[in-house]
Amino acid sequence: MRRYGKHTDEDDIRSRPNRKGNRPRTHIRPKHEDAAEGMVLTVDRGRLTCLVEDRVVTAMKARELGRKAAVVGDRVALVGDLSGKKDTLARIVRIAERSSVLRRTADDDDPYERVVVANADQLAVVTALADPEPRPRLIDRCLVAAYDGGLEPLLVLTKSDLAPPDKLLELYGDLDIPYVVTSRAELESGEAVERVREQLDGRITAFVGHSGVGKTTLVNALVPEERRRVTGHVNAVTGRGRHTTTSALALPLAGAEGWVIDTPGVRSFGLAHVDPSRVIHAFPDLEPGTEGCPRACSHDEPDCALDDWVAEGHADPARLYSLRRLLASRERSDGD
């Protein structure tokens, strides 16, 4: 039996109500042409603190971004309440293309990479010369991550009053990495802070280092308005300090132009995401010599063309040794 006659119109058709009350799905996304530009300062449990002009705004990621996550340093576009007042919330609707990315994995067997910081110009690797002892393999891994992600490295050696820096500096001399050596007395007087500040002026610098090396103490000295709780001691058994920074945080550099990004203390720095072929880009004097390498050359095998390239006098043998040491750090534990 026909329910409707031959001549029906839309008003005659019964429709099932949408119990959820949400709008029909569409593949057309809003353009948000009026969105404001901002920078992500920190991320905490799904809430992102952003700087929009001179206001600090709390935001969440818009659903249309899908699984794409914003991290500290990201340049983003925001809509919604941008007043920065208490209990207001904006939405991040776009994430700009990144100029650099600092990434790491939990370990070398973990296929899931974590983006720590975006758009930083420089990676400051903070290492104590004693108490706790330096860990060169961890430094090597941080350097590989910097070269792979498009950041320029900077070595910051602390506690020179406890041990001289010469031996460690000799290890990295052939890499031509800029460095700053500090002591506790110089930090207290402000002399060391000024030397570090000169290296950071006009740049966005991410600070990384394992616990107890004085990283957060140095950041607090560089950004005195943003005082943060500092680790009180180093564990006498493990030689490692307590974690004081639980999430990355971008802070405006005091007394100069630039930003400082303090990151949580690391106990390991996995490099499962790093393609060894990209590390060679940090060695422009060696890169032309790879033209004769076999396909997918690791640059540390018998058929590598770099051996002949260096033997012919095109580059310093010490540079090739440094390259291979960094590449080999991917195969070694960073806990030694």
Image: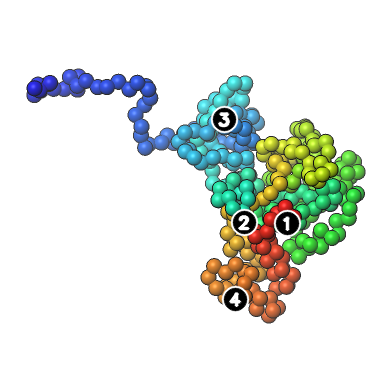
Picture quarter with the C terminus: bottom right
Which of labels 2 and 3 is toward the front?
Answer: 2
Count of all numbered marks drawn on residues in the image: 4
Query: Residue, x 59% and y 45% (percent of image)?
Result: 114
Q: Which residue is mark 4?
A: 303
Judge whether 301 appears above or below 240 on screen.
below
**Type of residue at label 2?**
Asp
Does residue 289 show up? no
Q: Position of residue 325 (x, y in %)?
A: 70, 64
Dot 3, how many residues are within 10 Å of its Cα: few (below 14), some (14-19), or many (20+)? many
**Which of the two labelled residues, at mark 2 and mark 4, occupies the earlier sequence position?**
2
Judge whether 330 appears above or below 73 on screen.
below
- Label 1 element class: helix
Picture quarter with the N terminus: top left
Which of labels 1 and 3 is toward the front?
Answer: 1
Q: Which residue is mark 1?
A: 137
- Dividing the picture into quadrants, the one containing residue 255 is top right
Asked whether 136 or 98 is in front, the reply is: 136
Q: Position of residue 269 (x, y in %)?
A: 67, 50
Mark 1 touches mark 2? (CB < 8 Å): no
- Label 4 element class: loop
Q: Position of residue 176 (x, y in %)?
A: 75, 62
**Type of residue at label 4?**
Asp
Q: How is the image coloured?
A: rainbow
Q: Which residue is mark 2?
A: 148
Q: Which residue is mark 3?
A: 59
